[in-house]
Amino acid sequence: MQHVSGKTVTVKSIQSQDEDQAEAGVGTRVGLALKGIEDTEIEKGDLLTKIKVAKRGSIEGKLRLSSLGLEEMKPGNFYWLVSNFSYSKATMENMLSDKATFKLERALAVDKGDRFLLIRDKAPRIFASGEVL
């Protein structure tokens, strides 16, 4: 497995509800014993994947706006972008039709096709979703 740091990591064992498991299904909360990385090198939202997924400081995505979130989206606006259990403050850099580019305050591990949400300070807080291009 690949960690977002670029390290190759081996899953030595999986536990769920204090019982050893051979594998875990989608949505199962697990504990992992990992070889090849220290616990201090792992942060919330980090990914273990078959292929390396690098952290990005900016994201281009295709947006889908909620019909309830009547807001003009324009460059310079700040939002919270949430994807893969991680989040970052995001500044919209440009928007063309349904595609936008966001500069992230904190790099996130996302790959093409990953889904994200945009959150703002006023209701409805979640007003847009998107897919990384």
Image (tube, rainbow, N blue to C red):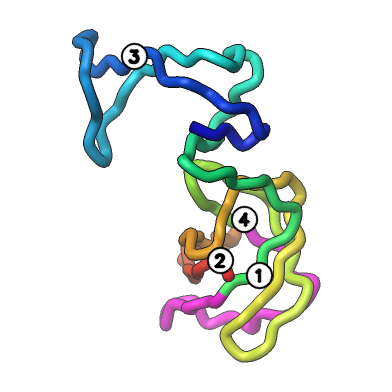
* Residue 63 within the magenta-colored segment of the rendering: yes
29 is higher (above) or lower (below) than 119: above
82 is higher (above) or lower (below) than 32: below
* Marks 4 and 2, the one that precedes in the sequence: 4
Q: Position of residue 107 (x, y in %)?
A: 71, 46
Mark closer to the observer (4, 2): 2
* Residue 65 within the magenta-colored segment of the rendering: yes
CB under 8 Å between callouts 2 and 1?
yes
Q: Position of residue 88 (x, y in %)?
A: 66, 48
Residue beneath disc 3: 13
Marks 4 and 1, Cα distance to the nearest angstrom? 15 Å
Residue numbers of the magenta segment: 62-80
- Quarter of the rendering containing residue 111: bottom right
CB under 8 Å between callouts 4 and 1?
no
Looking at the picture, tell me which residue is in the foreground, 64 or 8: 8
69 is higher (above) or lower (below) than 51: below
CB under 8 Å between callouts 2 and 3?
no
Residue beneath disc 2: 132
Marks 3 and 4, Cα distance to the nearest angstrom? 35 Å
Marks 2 and 3, Cα distance to the nearest angstrom? 32 Å
Residue beneath disc 1: 60
Q: Position of residue 9 (x, y in %)?
A: 53, 23
Crowding near the residue tagged with mark 2, few <14, some 14–19, many ≥20 C-alpha atoms within 10 Å: some
Marks 2 and 1, Cα distance to the nearest angstrom? 6 Å
* Marks 4 and 1, the one that precedes in the sequence: 1
* Marks 2 and 3, the one that precedes in the sequence: 3
